[in-house]
Amino acid sequence: DAISIIDSYHVDAGVFKTEPYSLPPEMPLEPKDTEGNPTEWNEIEKAVLTRRSVRNFKEKPVPESLIQRVLEAGRFAPSGGNCQPWKFVVITKKEMIDEIDKVAINVLKTMHNTYINDNSIKALEGYVKDGVGNFDPRIIIGGMGAIGKEGGLTPSLNAPAVILLLGDQRAIGAPQISIGICGQTMNLVANSLGIKACWSGFFALGASYHPTLKKELGIEPPWICISSLCLGYPKFKQEGIVPRENRPVKWFREDKDKSVVPEKSNVPQTEKQEA
């Protein structure tokens, strides 16, 4: 199901302090041509704007021929220094997916329970410095708390196919960025083939912590599992553009230097938005 955003998230102070002003979700700005005249979105823009993260999959298996096309899209993605620091692991074996789900759920439950007690949260202070975003209360209390509940979502989102995205830590720059570019290229191509996809860092976490499968999956130095893509056919149609935050953009032009806030779209906003 889509997530309903009732109000904006706001924190006044601390490491998770938010912007002093709200960033209400807005629909895309009207497209314009090189002369500034109204025009239409091209096909690539439409593919980017209408893509959705699907979390409700049918049991129907994804043909290997289509999975291979998704992998090829990732193989030809750009990367820092053209290092191509990726390795793909495709899992369609349900028993293995379930095994990794179980490990991930145990890790997530441990993290979630830690945030219930103030003293145990303080014990994590040393780890937070290495990755602040991983310890965001919204993720720990909300996302991690929802995963693994009876009849709820699993880290694999019950998808019939999952692609692990492994990155070589020896790569030039940050392999995480190259893997992100690679994975999103795969995501868009999957969508174009009628397969839907969703990123799952939680499933990648389970694969990384699995005591026996980790080595079999190839997750050993210098390779780390950065994320995963869950693939499958959607249970129901889930397409269309949804509002996104419109953060002000600063432009440095030849003739002026000032912050420019994009014009607001003409699409009316409602109090309750679907994300």
Image (cartoon, rainbow, N blue to C red):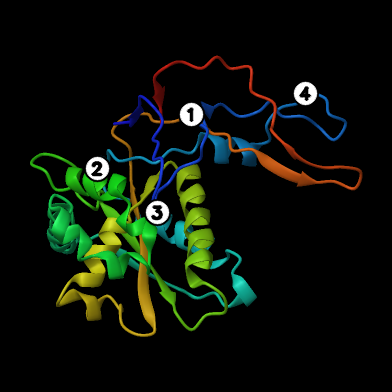
* Residue farthest along the right direction in this orientation: 255
- In the rendered image, residue 170, in percent from the top left (x then y), is placed at 48, 84
Cα distance in 3D space between marks 4 and 3: 42 Å
**Residue located 58% across and 34% down the image:** 246
Cα distance in 3D space between marks 4 and 2: 41 Å
The reply to whether the C-beta atoms of the residues labelled 4 and 3 are less than 8 Å apart is no
Callout 4 amino acid:
Pro
Q: Dot 1, how many residues are within 10 Å of its Cα: few (below 14), some (14-19), or many (20+)?
A: some
Tell how many labels. 4
Cα distance in 3D space between marks 1 and 3: 29 Å
Cα distance in 3D space between marks 4 and 1: 21 Å
Left or right position of 18 against 253: left
Q: Nearer the viewer, residue 142 or 168?
A: 142
| Residue corresponding to mark 1 | 242
Which badge, 4 or 3, comes first in the chain's sequence?
3
Callout 2 amino acid:
Gly
| Quadrant of the frame with the N terminus | top left
Q: Dot 2, how many residues are within 10 Å of its Cα: few (below 14), some (14-19), or many (20+)?
A: few
**Residue located 33% across and 51% down the image:** 136
Q: Disc 4 or disc 3, which is closer to the eye?
A: 3
Cα distance in 3D space between marks 2 and 3: 18 Å
Tell me the quarter of the picture where residue 101 sits.
bottom left
Cα distance in 3D space between marks 1 and 2: 21 Å
Which badge, 1 or 2, comes first in the chain's sequence?
2
- In the rendered image, residue 152, in percent from the top left (x then y), is placed at 15, 40
| Residue corresponding to mark 2 | 142
- In the rendered image, residue 45, in percent from the top left (x then y), is placed at 63, 38
| Residue corresponding to mark 4 | 38
The reply to whether the C-beta atoms of the residues labelled 4 and 1 are less than 8 Å apart is no
| Residue corresponding to mark 3 | 15
Q: Is residue 260 above or below residue 179?
A: above
Instruction: Name the element at disc 1.
Output: loop
